[in-house]
């Protein structure tokens, strides 16, 4: 259903997907293509809109499924909700169930990388309702202890500075897009239309006010690192690591450490790309995914 509060470009993105009722929430799902399923998990603080260019490169051969986690994009953003990564994984599982996904190639970026790991932990425990055929890991700080977090993330991560971060939320609309671009090596890839959509997806249902709750993922990663890194280590299906070398947050040293921990994984470093490699060079990322899962 059209939303008159959204600008025309964002209306088109809304029309390209649909909402599912999942665990009492309206979850926005974007699905395109036919064939083996590629299940794409987005990161913080953006949305599944990040995957649009990658899907362009994959939808001719694969059924691409992505969605906005609660608190992000066009999904519901309730104030009374924990936004734990375990809850976010529950939603991912129920989206897959609602779409009758029996098996999938899973791709995770940023926070989506850690939710990806929790899916694997559940599969290894015998409680995941679908089979993971392969895993592609893009830049993301599941190894939270060696991440180079941004100044705003530092405010969100500390109990002492959290009130300062909350006070800054209303002014975030002026700094949000420049802050995202600062994490890229190719910020020119973000068009004026993209900026409108990305800004509105943040503000939808006061999403910017959910950032303090969403940012709890950083602490969860530290608490549950053994579980989540262990899930990648224990995986028996093919794994690849695709890491942009210019990421100022999930830095190249982190990618190399992950490759050391997972010697069974195919590791590829992509030059001159930043944290949002899936936006900066979607054709290359799509090709890495396509080639890997087709071999």
Image (tube, helix red, strand yellow):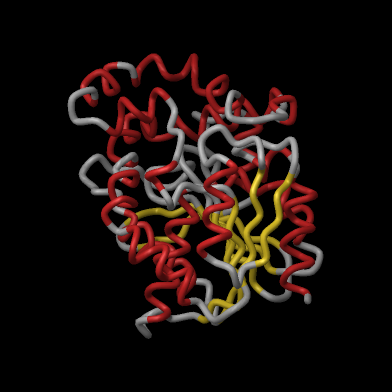
Q: Residue at x 42, y 19 (%)?
A: 172
Q: Check the picture and name the quadrant holding the C terminus.
A: bottom right
Residue nearest the observer in this picture, 2 or 85: 85
| Outermost residue to the bottom | 126
Q: Position of residue 85 (x, y in %)?
A: 34, 55
Q: Residue at x 49, y 14 (%)?
A: 174
* Quarter residue 18 falls in: bottom right
Seen in the picture, residue 84 relative to 135 is either above or below; the reply is above
Residue nearest the observer in this picture, 144 or 195: 144
Q: Residue at x 68, y 68 (%)?
A: 63
Q: Residue at x 60, y 62 (%)?
A: 65
Residue nearest the observer in this picture, 148 or 69: 148
Q: Position of residue 88 (x, y in %)?
A: 37, 57
Seen in the picture, residue 103 relative to 110 is either above or below; the reply is below
Q: How many marks?
A: 0
Q: Position of residue 207 (x, y in %)?
A: 38, 34
* Quarter residue 103 falls in: bottom right
Q: Position of residue 240 (x, y in %)?
A: 64, 64
């Amino acid at each position: 259903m059209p939303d008159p509060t959204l600008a025309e470009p964002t209306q088109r993105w809304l029309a390209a997907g649909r909402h599912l009722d999942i665990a009492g929430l309206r979850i926005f799902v974007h699905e395109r293509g036919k064939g083996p399923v590629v299940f794409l998990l987005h990161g913080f603080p953006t949305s599944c809109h990040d995957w649009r260019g990658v899907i362009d490169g994959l939808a001719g051969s694969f059924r691409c499924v992505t969605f906005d986690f609660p608190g992000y994009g066009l999904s519901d953003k309730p104030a009374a909700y924990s936004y734990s990564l375990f809850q976010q994984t529950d939603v991912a599982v129920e989206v897959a169930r609602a779409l009758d996904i029996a098996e999938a190639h899973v791709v995770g970026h940023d926070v989506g990388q850690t939710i990806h790991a929790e899916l694997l932990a559940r599969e290894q425990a015998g409680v995941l309702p679908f089979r993971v055929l392969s895993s592609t890991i893009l830049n993301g700080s599941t190894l939270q202890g060696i991440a180079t977090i941004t100044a705003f993330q530092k405010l969100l991560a500390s109990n002492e500075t959290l009130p300062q971060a909350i006070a800054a939320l209303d002014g975030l609309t002026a700094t949000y897009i420049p802050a995202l671009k600062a994490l890229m090596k190719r910020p020119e890839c973000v068009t004026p239309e993209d900026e409108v959509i990305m800004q509105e997806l943040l503000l939808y249902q006061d999403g910017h006010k959910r950032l303090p709750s969403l940012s709890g993922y950083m602490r969860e990663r530290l608490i549950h690192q053994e579980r989540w890194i262990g899930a990648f280590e224990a995986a028996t299906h093919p794994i690849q690591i695709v890491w942009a070398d210019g990421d100022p947050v999930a830095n190249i040293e982190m990618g190399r450490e992950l490759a050391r921990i997972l010697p069974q994984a195919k590791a590829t470093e992509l030059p001159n790309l930043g944290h949002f490699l899936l936006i900066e060079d979607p054709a290359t990322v799509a090709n890495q995914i396509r080639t890997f899962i087709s071999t």
